Amino acid sequence: MSLFTVVIEGRLTASPVSGHTRDGREYVQFPIVHRDRYRDATGKWQDAKAMFFEVMCWGDLASRVRNLVRGDQVVVEAGQLLPYINDSELPALKVQARNVSVSMRFTDAHAGTQTKQRRGDIVVTGDGERYAADAYPEVVADRELVHHR
């Protein structure tokens, strides 16, 4: 029995990749990023440094998470840190998931392929600023920011 548990909420930065060990055991892994925001002394929103996690899932859990897609917001309950070599200078951890669920904090539950964005969608930032989605395509990757006219 493990006493270590960590709960991480983050957004998938890539779709899950599945595979099998030499023994035939199925696994699925996917990367998530957790970005925290805070208000500074002037009251403006600031982005904290992003934290990256590589999530490993095994067995039945692996077969369930394979339908997630890049951009899905998830909550991961992990019980084991795994050795991980990261090529970038950004902080990263590899965790073994006990449970994964779709987060509904910012949007309705969604897992699987997303519907294409329509022209005329408006992107609203966390600060309340409004932009036309087709003018800022890199911002529209966050589904929670898209609102329809």
Image (spheres, rainbow, N blue to C red):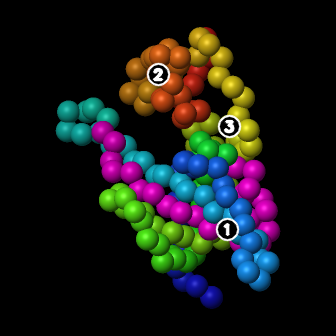
As displayed, is residue 107 above or below residue 12?
A: above
As displayed, is residue 144 above or below residue 80?
A: above
Q: The disc labelled 1 sits on which kind of residue?
A: Cys
Asked whether the viewer can see residue 136, the reply is: yes
Q: Where is residue 3 in the image (x, y as percent from the top left)?
A: 54, 83
Closer to us: 87 or 31: 87
Q: What stretch is highlighted in magenta?
A: 46-68
Closer to us: 38 or 14: 14
Residue 136's label in the rendered image is: 2
First along the sequence among labels 2 and 3: 3
Tell me the CA gap for discs 1 and 3: 24 Å
Tell me the CA gap for discs 1 and 2: 34 Å
Residue 108's label in the rendered image is: 3
Residue shown at 46%/52% (left/top)? 34
Q: Where is residue 8 in the image (x, y as percent from the top left)?
A: 52, 60
Q: Do the residues labelled 2 and 3 touch (CB within 8 Å)?
A: no
Q: The disc labelled 2 sits on which kind of residue?
A: Tyr
Report whether 40 appears left or right of 20: left
Residue shown at 58%/64% (left/top)? 55
Looking at the image, is mark 2 or mark 3 nearer the viewer?
A: 2
Asked whether the viewer can see residue 103, the reply is: no
Closer to us: 126 or 24: 24
Q: What element carries label 2?
A: loop
Q: Name the residue under label 1.
A: 57
- Residue 72, picture quadrant: top right
Looking at the image, is mark 1 or mark 3 nearer the viewer?
A: 1
Q: Where is residue 78 in the image (x, y as percent from the top left)?
A: 58, 70
Quadrant occupied by the C terminus = top right
Report whether 15 appears left or right of 139: right
Residue shown at 71%/41% (left/top)? 110
Q: Do the residues labelled 1 and 2 touch (CB within 8 Å)?
A: no
Q: Is residue 135 magenta?
A: no
